Amino acid sequence: MSDRDLGYAVIAFLVIFISVPALYLAFHFLAPSHYRLVVFENINALNFLKKQDQVRLRGVEAGQVLDVFLKDGKTCVRI
């Protein structure tokens, strides 16, 4: 093995060694940390709601709709 091949192997190892933990930490710390469950009494009010719709609170983007489901006869929305 020449010195050039050894250098490329070391660089490839370092890139993998650094990128795997960096990607794990990025996905772990940049993921949304709070999910909200909103319960609606009237089902007819949610005919416009779809998954991945943006949710705004006082003009600021608060997240997106993750799931719409029924629970105990009430409509629940996970944001």
Image (tube, rainbow, N blue to C red):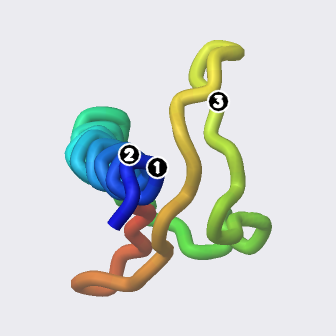
Q: What is the crowding at mark 1: few (fewer than 14 residues within 10 Å), some, or many (at least 20)? A: few
Which amino acid is tagged 2?
Gly
Q: Are marks 2 and 3 in contact (CB under 8 Å)?
A: no
Q: Are marks 1 and 2 in contact (CB under 8 Å)?
A: yes
Q: What is the crowding at mark 3: few (fewer than 14 residues within 10 Å), some, or many (at least 20)? A: few
Any part of residue 78 in sight: yes
Is residue 57 left or right of 40 when viewed as pictured?
right
The label shown at residue 66 is none
Query: Would you place residue 64 above or below residue 66 in this image?
Result: above
Which amino acid is tagged 1?
Arg
Query: Would you place residue 20 above or below residue 69 in this image?
Result: above
Q: Nearer the viewer, residue 11 or 18?
A: 11
In primary-sequence order, the first of circles 3 and 1 is: 1
- Which mark is nearer the camera, 2 or 3? 2
Q: Position of residue 8 (x, y in %)?
A: 44, 51
For the point 70% across and 70% down, the residue is 50
For the point 53% across and 30% down, the residue is 62
Q: Nearer the viewer, residue 66 or 27?
A: 27
Farthest residue in the right direction? 48
For the point 28% across and 82% down, the residue is 71
Which amino acid is tagged 3?
Arg
Residue named by callout 1:
4
- Which mark is nearer the camera, 3 or 1? 1
Helix, strand or loop status at disc 3 = strand
